[in-house]
Image (tube, rainbow, N blue to C red):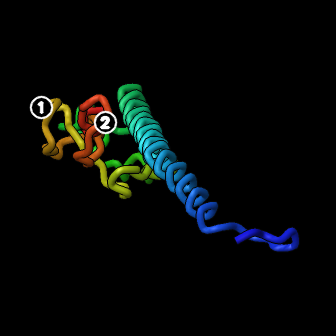
Amino acid sequence: MRRRRNQLGLTLVELIVAFTIMTLLTALALPLARFKVRREKERELRYALTDIRKAIDKYKDACDGNKIPQKMGTDCYPETLEQLVEGVKMANDANGKKIKFLRRLPRDPFTRSTEWGMRSTQDDPTSTGWGGQNIFDVYTKSMEKAPDGTLYSEW
């Protein structure tokens, strides 16, 4: 059938070709979008781990410098992550002023919670259990693997 000049629209073949092109473009873009989301989560995880580890180091420095009281058996490391957020009363301060090391506990981008795996100075560096004495290091509880094959919990 011939088209008249005043008829507008697409033929069935044109629609099928356009739909096929759109499907191919979508199929190519989806893996790139997943890759980008994964990279963003990895970036957030690195930032959160660095933030918590710096706070633990600041706590240790304050304790070693006698700015905050040392509890026996903690080796001058915090007993809980909440101590970093709530703060610790300064030693020899009559006003009860507190030193805070974190504004809030960062969220783990893979588990979507603020619960982190913890290791004390007495724990094995590769253990997934926490001895409970102090907090020397933190890790994600996610069992997912990075593109290089390492577990995110080993970061």
Relative to 61, say whether 152 is above or below.
below
Kind of residue indicated by mark 2: Ala
Badge 1 marks a residue whose secondary structure is loop
Q: In the rendered view, does 13 fall on the left or right side of 104?
A: right
Q: Amino acid at mark 1?
A: Asp
Verify CB contact (< 8 Å) between mark 1 and mark 2: no
Q: How many marks?
A: 2
The residue that disc 2 covers is 146
Name the N-terminal-most of marks 1 and 2. 1
Residue 25 percent across, percent down from the top left: 54, 49
Whole-percent x and y of residue 15?
A: 61, 64
Question: Of all residues shown, which one is farthest toward the right?
Answer: 6
Say which quarter of the image contains residue 114. Answer: bottom left
Q: Which quarter of the picture shows residue 66?
A: top left
Residue neighbourhood size for the residue with mark 1, other residues' Cα within 10 Å, grouped as few (<14), some (14–19), many (≥20)? few
Other residues around mark 2 within 10 Å, as few (<14) / some (14–19) / many (≥20): some
Label 1 sits on residue? 124
Quarter holding the C terminus?
top left
Q: Residue at x 16, y 44 (%)?
A: 130
Q: Give how far across and how far down residue 13 sits, in percent.
A: 59, 62
